[in-house]
Amino acid sequence: MDSKHNAAVINDMIRRYVAGAGDIKPQDWTEFVAAQNDGYRTGPEIGEKVPDFTLTDQYGKSRALAELTGPNGLLLVFVRSAHW
Amino acid sequence: MKNLKARGVNVASISYDSREVLRAFADTHKLEYPLLSDVGSKVIRAFGIFNTNVSEDNQMLYGIPFPGDYLIAPNGIVRDKVFLPDYQYRPTVSELMLRNFADDTGGSAVEVATSALTARISLSTDRCFPGQELGVALKFRLRPGWHVYGKPLPDNYRHLEVVFDGEIVGKQSFEFPPAKPVMLKALGETLPVYEGEFRAIGKLGIKWSPPPEVKFLGDSLGKRIEPGPYKLIGTLRFQACSDDVCEPPQAIRFELPLTLEADAPPAASKAD
């Protein structure tokens, strides 16, 4: 699938969902999920180093990777959103 | 989470949300770990997991990652990771911990004992959501002088295996260590066997149930699995032999309790 097609499928689902979801069929939903997951990438492989970063946490505190990591490591969870 | 802390592993999450959204979400769900705000998705891009299927004009979804978890060692090297392209089975953190730290799981466990062996079967957790994948730890101890069979094996013998069945069981797979080929004098054959103590690990998918946000689709995506207490039923199959006696193949049923959680409360509503 090409990226234009995926983007169109995703946009269409969001539009219909926001409009009340009344006309969404099961195959539409399956297509939407497939469009979102097309070409799924998983980033650094096991054994590779992750990029360093510093981000702000929910309290506004600046947090660097090294400082976030515990004595045995860090479970870093990438989520789509905490908002929906 | 307690399990992680006890192992010296911290937790943090990253999403494109603003600090305010994350604060509200953390307060609602009483989350104490750092929820990191990656507005503009710089870090998501740096990890190479930016979801390019979403176009820039999609104000709701643009910026999301392909979701997944990394277990990062103190030196910054990826020790393990789980990503979820198959959205119906989501590996649990408890499975990841089991794989990496051989935790004696913290989930429900059952012990099966026969004259020839003891098997301890434990789950990585005793509660989960439909669609999650659990870790299964198997610990075997054979009585001295006894063995069970591994694979590959001629048809007239029974290899060691564990199989779960029942209404909530989805796909499953087990990794056994390689069995040692041994010349068995009484049989005059060389067969792969296990002796002494050994472990195996497995993955057990709990059937997916349509999430609350697609309730409008009814049962058309699959039957809803109601929350509550369940019993996972499994069978341990093996054939135990000693140097001079071979027992007939056995199939022992066992049960493990598992509680399926109710749907998580809507993530967004309190944040608005």
Image (cartoon, coloured by chain):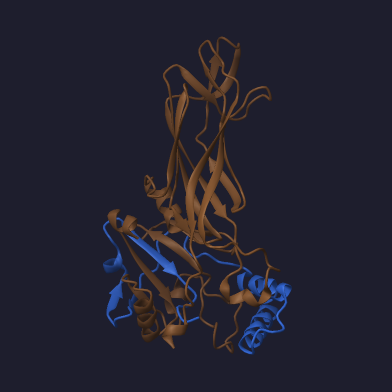
Of A45 and B83, which appears nearest the observer?
A: B83
Residue B237 in the image: state x and y as whole percent: 57, 32
B172 to B189, vertically: above or below: below
Asked whether, in this view, residue A17 is left or right of residue B36, the answer is right
- Chain assigned blue: A
Asked if residue B109 can be seen in this view, the reply is yes
Chain B pictured colour: brown
Of A44 and B120, which appears nearest the observer?
A: B120
| Picture quadrant where residue B8 is located | bottom left
B223 to B139, vertically: above or below: below
Residue B122 in the image: state x and y as whole percent: 44, 43
> Which residue is found at the position 61% from the left and 70% from the top?
A37
| Picture quadrant where residue A17 is located | bottom right
Residue B38 in the image: state x and y as whole percent: 41, 80
Quadrant in the picture for the N terminus of chain B = bottom left
Asked if residue A47 can be seen in this view, the reply is no
> Which residue is found at the position 60% from the left and 30% from the top?
B151
Of A10 and B76, which appears nearest the observer?
A: A10
B38 to B149, vertically: above or below: below
Asked whether, in this view, residue B200 is left or right of residue B171, the answer is left
